[in-house]
Image: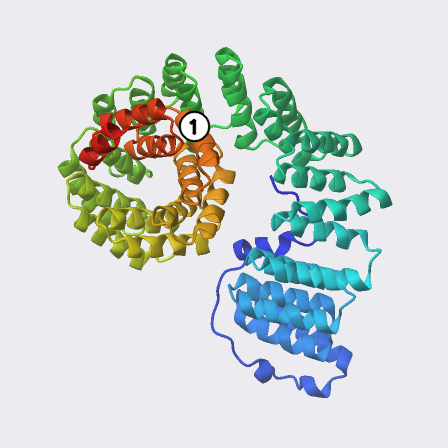
Amino acid sequence: MRYRFHFLFVLALLPCLISNSCSPKNPGGLGLGAKELSRRAASDYYFLVYQDLLRSGKRDEAAAVLSTLSELTPAPRLLLDLANLYWGMNQRDKAIEILQEGVKRFPEEKQVVFYLASAYQMQRRREEAIAVVRAYLDKNPGDLTGHQEMASLLIDSERYREALDSLEKLQASGPTAAVFFFKAKAFSGLGDRTSAIASLREAIKTDPNMVAAWAELGFLLEQEKDYKGAEESYKKILDLGEEGPEVWLRLIKLNLKLKNPSRAMALLDKAPREDAFVLESLSAFLVEGYAAEAGKLLDRLEKTSPASPDMLFYRAVVAYEGEKKPAKALAYLERVPESHAHYDKSLGFRIQLLLETDKSAKALELARQAAERFPDKKEFSLLAAAALEKTGDVRGSAETLARAGEKWPDDPEILYRLGVVLERQNRRDESVAAMEKIIVLDPNHADALNFVGYTLADENRDLARAMELIGRAVAIEPDNPYFLDSLAWAHFRQGEREKAWEVIRRAVAHPVADPVIWEHYGDIAASLGKKSEAAEGYRKALSGKPDNADELRRKKDAL
């Protein structure tokens, strides 16, 4: 949960509050001879005109008048209002241009500086955000609010050590709940949960009403498997008046982990009843193995809404997740009326179940119909591509994904699926290009990082970059056996056989049946003279019925 201060929410909220309007018009024809008025009277006049236009929804014209007013009477507040107005009209570059000019005119006005930093940050221009706050702090080294803002930006940029250095100075000047909270975020980023939890407890001691600190503490205690402590943290959030469904859901999940389903059911009676929340709760009961309780929950809900078509969807979830009966789930979903508000979701669920039950032709037919009916839902293009691939039409799958990519050009999920399908067509350069684009769009997309890193290692080129990319993927998912296999293979390619052996053993410590992983296990073991382990690796690789079975047999026989 993010904890921000002062003015930084405003730019983020305005797009929700202000929509696009008509084209800008010249405010010069407003009449009344404004130029003949005194400067103060003209300013008042333009301000009244601006407010009237804004109330009338004429935002483009309001922005033009406010621009004139800011030139007539330069003031930080007017520049901020103008920047917010353009931001709300989705003219982000114009808003930033105004804020940049504001910082030049009023370099000591930290409100303007922080607005510009926030705007940069929301565009992921983190280095520019840090630079503008740093320039302010160079001139105002004693401004504690500025140091706090700098710490927040450094944490957002994953520069946790620098953030801690800044926060230590703040703490020396006067410890506040915000300083302790940000220290906790920095420690958490460094993987030091113990110090993070200690800092959060200091934050709460300083300000017992700090909801963000309680939420972060609950989350970290969950990770430490201190479920009782986490439950107390979430209860405190409810006591403070935060009634959001997320907190109730955390409490329900915690009680299920504590093997207390009756308590979880009791919490459901007090919690919100939104569809999404009910489904999440059902899923939580099913994940923890309480299918019977999930069924009882549905029985209760059905008494209050007996004719609700939502019940069909919920019953399908229980039949699939809890009873492991996909055919029964399909029967429920087929009864969901097309007039239902969430018919598209039931349709998507149906298609997935058809794919799972090897009814790919029917799944493809339904996915194509759904894509025509819901052209703005990318999920149906993805499902159609999956159905084509399952029927053996890999080329058709790639074409479907390529068309989806034209419609949603910067969608990481579509790009990733396209990259995988292209790889299966042996179009490796194109597949890597798709994955490289994902990494630009989302530097923390672990699967894309691993894909490119493994490809480089497998081709025995640019091994330094391969290690860097795979290392980032492993940092995100340290127990992923596929990522560990890639890391082991990169070490092996670099001649680091002992390190490769250490990592590949970590990979196969997980239940894996992938023949490639076991082949790598065999190759690394063989290079170290570990013949019995190598034989085991090749034997397990062969059990997966790989395409290169003859080659694996030759390796095994050569031991």
Looking at the rendering, which quadrant does residue 270 occupy?
top right
Total tally of numbered discs in the picture: 1
Looking at the rendering, which quadrant does residue 39 occupy?
bottom right
User: In the picture shown, does residue 62 fall above or below 199?
Assistant: below
Residue 495: x %, y % from top left: 44, 42
- Is residue 134 found left or right of 402 in the rendered image? right
Position of the N terminus, as image quadrant, is top right
Position of the C terminus, as image quadrant, is top left
Tag 1: amino acid = Arg
Residue 137 shows in this picture: yes
Residue 37: x %, y % from top left: 73, 84
Look at mark 1 in the image and give the residue it sits on: 505
**Under tag 1, what secondary structure?**
helix
User: In the picture shown, does residue 107 fall above or below 125?
Assistant: below
Circle 1 Cα neighbour tier, 10 Å, few/some/many (<14 / 14–19 / ≥20): some
Q: In percent of the image, x 71 and y 60: which residue is there?
A: 133
> Front-most of 406 and 342?
406
- Is residue 12 found left or right of 312 in the rendered image? right
Q: In percent of the image, x 61 and y 49: which residue is there?
A: 156
- Is residue 176 found left or right of 348 in the rendered image? right
> Front-most of 74 and 128?
128
Q: In percent of the image, x 58 and y 80: which residue is there?
A: 27
> Front-most of 521 and 230?
521
Residue 119 shows in this picture: no
